[in-house]
Image (spheres, grey):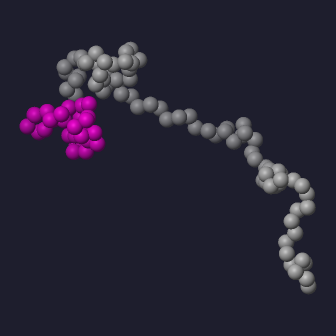
């Protein structure tokens, strides 16, 4: 048996590698490929979180701002339920009040 008989044969056509790949492995129809596409996740509702720019008059979003422009002191001091449980990931930067058991607000 000669060496030529043991070596795999290349295709003798002049088709490019990409053409051979598209012929051998056809791509799904683009409409079918996106038929099960998901919609983007919904934005979180931050309308209860005070806008940090509004009190200084520097909120550029105006009425379209996703944060609260409510200046009522009762809503500005809303307690952070995560701090109360001991796990607020925003720390000192949290927009809600971090209230200690003795009543002091620390942020």
Task: Tell me which residue sits at (19%, 26%) in the image.
Answer: 77
Camera-side residue of 66 and 81: 66
Residue at image position (13%, 38%) is: 100
Q: Which residues are magenta?
A: 79-107
What residue sits 22% from the left and 37% below the top?
A: 92
On the rendered structure, is 100 left or right of 29? Answer: left
Q: Position of residue 35 (x, y in %)?
A: 67, 38
In the image, residue 82 above or below residue 58: below
User: Is residue 42 among the parts visible in the rendering?
Assistant: yes
Across and down, in percent, residue 61 comes to: 39, 18
Would residue 90 be found to the left or right of residue 39 on screen? left
Q: Is residue 95 magenta?
A: yes
Residue 70 in sight in this render: no
In the rendered image, the residue lying farthest to the bottom is: 1
Residue 17: quadrant of the picture: bottom right
In this view, the residue in front, 66 or 85, is: 66
Q: Is residue 100 magenta?
A: yes
Horizontally, residue 18 falls left or right of residue 68, namely right
Quarter of the image with the N terminus in it:
bottom right
Q: Quadrant of residue 59?
A: top left
Where does the image place residue 45, in percent across and percent down from the top left?
39, 28
């Amino acid at each position: 048996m000669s060496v030529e008989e043991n070596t795999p044969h290349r295709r003798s056509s002049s088709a490019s590698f990409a053409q051979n790949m598209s012929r051998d492995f056809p791509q799904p129809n683009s409409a079918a490929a996106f038929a099960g596409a998901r919609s983007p996740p919904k934005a979180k509702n931050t309308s209860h979180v005070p806008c940090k720019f509004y009190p200084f008059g520097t909120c550029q979003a105006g009425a379209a701002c996703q944060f609260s422009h409510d200046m009522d002191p009762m809503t500005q001091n809303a307690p952070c339920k995560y701090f109360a449980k001991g796990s607020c990931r925003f720390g000192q930067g949290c927009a809600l009040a971090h209230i200690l058991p003795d009543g002091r607000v620390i942020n």
